[in-house]
Amino acid sequence: MTDETLHTADARAVARPRYGWPGVAIALAFALLYGYDLWEAVTNATELPKQYAEIAKLGIPVGDVPWTLIIANMLIPPVVYLFAVVLGLRRSVFGRAVLFAVGLALVAVLSLDIIAIA
């Protein structure tokens, strides 16, 4: 290897931002917010079938419990969070925070859409 290739490799290693303590703190703070959305989805998964059963007892036809939507609602927060973590690997701390915030907004929109459909 020549000195030029060593210098270029060192410059790339230094230029690439990594998850330091500010990045980890942001990731953990947003993990709590994403976790809250996941908690809401799990609560919906336990309570919605009960509500369907109560409505059916009144003689009102409600159809089957939308398990596909319930499972999708539980999968959205962790999947979007993992995408934000992976996409944020090569970003600055501010870029990671923006990426997590956009992902959280996406989770909120998709969760509300699923609730509206169910």
Image (cartoon, rainbow, N blue to C red):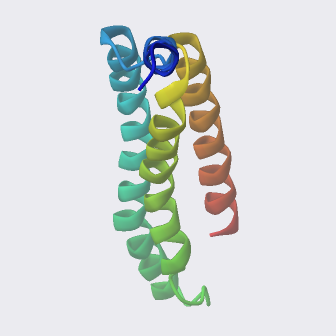
In the figure, is residue 12 to the left or right of 101? left
Q: How many marks?
A: 0
Q: Position of residue 27 (x, y in %)?
A: 39, 25
In the figure, is residue 92 to the left or right of 112? left
The residue located at (43%, 55%) in the rendering is: 41
In the figure, is residue 52 to the left or right of 103? left
Q: Position of residue 114 (x, y in %)?
A: 63, 61
Viewer-closest of 6 and 87: 6
Viewer-closest of 11 and 24: 11
- Up the image or down, 40 lies above or below 99; here it is below
Viewer-closest of 101 and 2: 2
The residue located at (35%, 29%) in the rendering is: 32
The C terminus sits in image quarter: bottom right
The N terminus sits in image quarter: top left
Q: Position of residue 84 (x, y in %)?
A: 52, 37
The residue located at (52%, 78%) in the rendering is: 68
